[in-house]
Image (tube, rainbow, N blue to C red):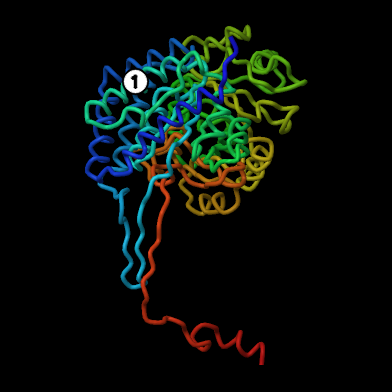
Amino acid sequence: MSVNYAEYVAGLVAKGHAAQKIAENFTQEKVDQLTAAVAYALTQPDVALKFGEKLVEESGMGIPGDKQLKMFGKVKGTYFQMKGQKSVGLVETDEKMGMEKYAKPMGVIGAIIPVTNGEATPVVKSLMALKTRNAIILAPHPKARNTNWEVTEMIRSILKKFDAPEDLVQAVAPDYVSIETSAEIMKQVDFILATGGTPMVRQAYSSGNPAIGVGTGNVVTIVDGTTKMDDVATLIMKSKTFDNATSCSTENNIIVLEECYDAFVEAMAKVGAAILKDGSEEKAKLLKTIWPESPANHDLNRHVVAQPAAKIAEMAGINVPEGTKMLIAEENAGYGNEFPFTGEKLSPVAALRKAKDFDDAIQQMLNIFEYQGKGHSCGIHTTIDERVSKLSDIVPVCKVCVNAPQSLTNSGSWTSGFPMSMTLGCGTWGHNSISHNATWKDLLNFTYVSRPIPSFQPKDEDLFDEEIRNAFK
């Protein structure tokens, strides 16, 4: 029997609108009660681990314990950011300018959920919607359909417990999860919050409805040798192996100044990285394992995504030391399609490059971003503030992480100032509409009220410098 996707989605949207009309009358206290209840219940250790295990079983990707930690960090962090913040009615007053600002909901949000973060993203996006009195429809990746459904059902039970409409949070039923359903959702909702690959994000932006999406990640980090190399190795390993690198926010390319290159390689080996030399048979085998159809195309082999490094090495027929947790392939010959290690790998695999000096390192980073990842993030391990400033001034990214594990920082953490988020804006560099990490504040409409104030129009003598005025005499 053929599926009428438009009709199915219309039913979800109608239920969402009905629930949202009720939520429009919620007080700030009610909104805050619901967000607190959902955040608390979904971050109970047994619950968070259960959904982590469920997603790993369903998708075959990632590590249950790391997914549990992700739930703790992202869900609690999201709630922490919104706790005590105004999102209902009058939220801001500027008496000097006679202005008032009122927050209002958007309506029904369509949320596209990636498989790589299919445990925490549904909860985070639901919290964002509840805080802003919106309804939300969660559209998962097919390999996360059952996990998404169970997470949503738990959130709905909490809403019912606290006398709120369950349909404020809906999920696509497992049997209806498909590209067609997601596309139809993007056509019918009031606003789209999209997290996923570039083709899906571009579809969101071309749907005809307002959207926030994220760009492709391909994070590059520079190591200049001025920090303790053992610490650098530990941070990079921690980031790159977390949840088997499900996050596109982790180090994909590492550029090391030649003066400390050997020390870096030695330090990485000590923490469990296997280095594959340029021109080696091992590197060639790994390349064909990750990108089986290279050089014709560079579609990732789905069987390596978020798998342990040792398993990937075994798939490639490479002998690596026992306890290997990360594979590092030297890639010094070039950039782009002919050198695919330059790009995203979604696995505990990184490319390693040698730079003759800091300026060369920046240029190499720029070359990589021209191929993939522009707008997302970069990192640097250094004690020289001037290098941080220069990097930040030149490189087209929205986030620069200094002396930190990239994937555990650029999406927000308890030890950084980045907002907690599962949707990282990449600016126009990444074909996105925002340059910041999306939060609940991005799901609000605002009404601005203006009252008469005394004129503040200045005289030309006060507004324009004398040099400018004299130039036109």
Q: Position of residue 31 (x, y in %)?
A: 27, 40
Task: Kindly identify the residue that appears in the image at 49 percent across and 36 percent down.
Answer: 193
In terms of depth relative to the viewer, which is nearer, 3 or 151? Answer: 3
* Quadrant in which the N terminus appears: top right
Task: Kindly identify the residue that appears in the image at 28 percent across and 26 percent down.
Answer: 43
Q: Is residue 24 visible?
A: yes
Residue kind at label 1, given as amino acid type: Glu
The number of numbered discs placed on residues in the rendered structure image is 1
Residue 2, image quadrant: top right
Q: Name the residue tied to disc 1.
A: 153
Q: Is residue 236 above or below residue 473?
A: above
Q: Position of residue 441 (x, y in %)?
A: 40, 47
In terms of depth relative to the viewer, which is nearer, 371 or 34? Answer: 34
On the picture, is 316 further left or further right than 416? right
Helix, strand or loop at label 1? It is helix
* Quadrant in which the C terminus appears: bottom right
On the picture, is 162 further left or further right than 335? left
Q: Is residue 414 above or below residue 101?
A: above
Q: Is residue 455 above or below residue 363?
A: below
* Residue furthest right as drawn: 296
Task: Kindly identify the residue that appears in the image at 31 percent across and 55 percent down.
Answer: 91
Q: Is residue 263 visible?
A: no
Q: Position of residue 233 (x, y in %)?
A: 47, 29
On the picture, is 109 further left or further right than 131? right
Q: Position of residue 428 (x, y in %)?
A: 61, 47
* Residue neighbourhood size for the residue with mark 1, other residues' Cα within 10 Å, grouped as few (<14), some (14–19), many (≥20): some
On the picture, is 163 further left or further right than 191? left
In terms of depth relative to the viewer, which is nearer, 409 or 449? Answer: 449
